[in-house]
Amino acid sequence: MITIEQADRLKKLPPYLFAELDRKKAEARSRGVDVIDLGVGDPDLPTPDNIINKLAEAAREPQYHRYPTYTGMNEFRKAVSRWYKKRAGVDLEPIQEVVSLIGSKEGIAHIPLAFINPGDVVLVPSPAYPVYAIATLFAGGIPHEMPLLKENSFLPDLGQIPADILGKAKMMFLNYPNNPTAAPATREFFRTVVDFAEKHNIMICHDFAYSEMTFDSYVPPSFLEIPGAMDVGIEFHSLSKTYNMTGWRIGWAAGNAKIIDGLGRIKSNIDSGIFEAIQVAGIEALEGEQQCLADMRDIYTERRDVLIGGLRKLGINVEPPKATFYVWFEVPSGYSSASFAALLLEKSGIVATPGNGFGSPGEGYVRMALTVSKERLAEAVERINTAGF
Ligand SMILES: *Cc1c(COP(=O)(O)O)cnc(C)c1O
């Protein structure tokens, strides 16, 4: 027998706050409860046919069966740079300024390994996608939370970051349109970020996963379109949410060549790139028929209106989001995030994600994802009405 002990980096992981809810969800299902799961940020809609057909075709090509290039097929990276030109007016040199990723999560998880030494500080939003802080810890860095508060429109207040932290800060993660709060960012905010980055010598990593998942004709700005952004940062993006491709694992990072180079060097020592048939299908996603985007927005708009309209009628104060497929709202008074989520499941068979699970400033909120049909959302509202919170 040997002693099997996990490394300190695993012991340092923050507690998994959804464990209790996961257990209750499984238990409700085993009791035969018809659970309406609004907990998971994973599109329920299928990948568009033209993309699937392209993969099926490409999968038969022996040239794609070999190891892919580490940093991505040139053709895919060129398609990404054409997308940036069309979508954001940004000129990118496809080989130096774009790297393909096995989903953006992969790049987010690896980037601190390229730039963060033990003791360096990484500024991370909170509440947030958990990977920013965890990737920082894995690299030996120190995550410093920037609270996203309603009174600041869920943008970090950069003036609140203490000077001694700023002295040690090397990198900042941002994510707009935002998960979990659904908040958008303005160009003005991004301009402030570029100036701040220049002044304090901080690399910016902007996560743009929800750029196309929008409502009411809103077009979110890319960080890279801000003058000076290419000097200080990169943007992560992915086909996952835009084209219902979460299972395919394809994304990219684009922007400053030195930052892209560092990420590429880490990757080339850890993974061997994305199956090239999937990259060929990715080009089809970016450059084929785009009707699927309008269809997706119509479907989420209907769902949003059913859920928001229903919750408002019940007296719950909730703002319609401009982007993402999340609805983020304050729990009724007298509840915490966890107690409200627990009661929703117990009384109504509805799973919502407690906001504190994304970081302590999320306490007092829950997140619902628009990843079930509008009929199921209407039923969810009806069940909440019957339970009478
Ligand atoms: C879904 C999501 C991603 C996308 O992850 P992939 O690895 O590209 O599937 C990235 N960031 C945030 C904030 C997300 O919610």
Image (spheres, rainbow, N blue to C red):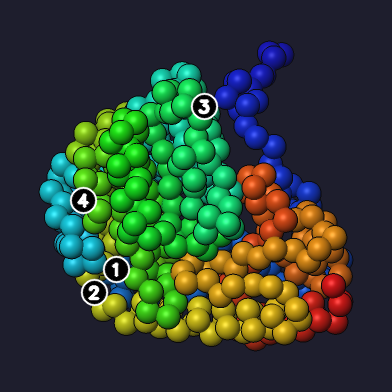
Q: CA distance from mark 3 to mark 4?
A: 29 Å
Q: Is residue 334 visible?
A: yes
Residue 161: x percent and y percent? Answer: 49, 35
Residue 295: x percent and y percent? Answer: 40, 83
The residue that appears at 66% across and 65% down in the rendered structure is 329
**Crowding near the residue tagged with mark 1, few <14, some 14–19, many ≥20 C-alpha atoms within 10 Å:** many
Query: Secondary structure under badge 1?
Result: helix
The residue that appears at 64% across and 47% down in the rendered structure is 361
Q: Considering only order in the chain, which callout, 1 or 3, is on the residue closer to the N terminus?
A: 3
Where does label 4 land, which residue?
Answer: 227
Q: CA distance from mark 2 to mark 4?
A: 30 Å
Whether tag 3 and tag 1 are in contact, CB under 8 A, the answer is no
- Left or right: residue 17 versus residue 118 is right
Disc 4: residue Cβ within 8 A of ligand 1's nearest atom = no
Q: Considering only order in the chain, which callout, 4 or 3, is on the residue closer to the N terminus?
A: 3
Whether tag 2 and tag 3 are in contact, CB under 8 A, the answer is no
Disc 3: residue Cβ within 8 A of ligand 1's nearest atom = no
> Which of 169/106 is in front?
169
Q: Can you name the residue that lies furthest to the front here?
A: 159
- Left or right: residue 144 versus residue 175 is right
Residue 246: x percent and y percent? Answer: 45, 60
Q: Considering only order in the chain, which callout, 1 or 4, is on the residue closer to the N terminus?
A: 4
Where does label 3 land, which residue?
Answer: 142
Checking the image for residue 288, the label placed there is 2
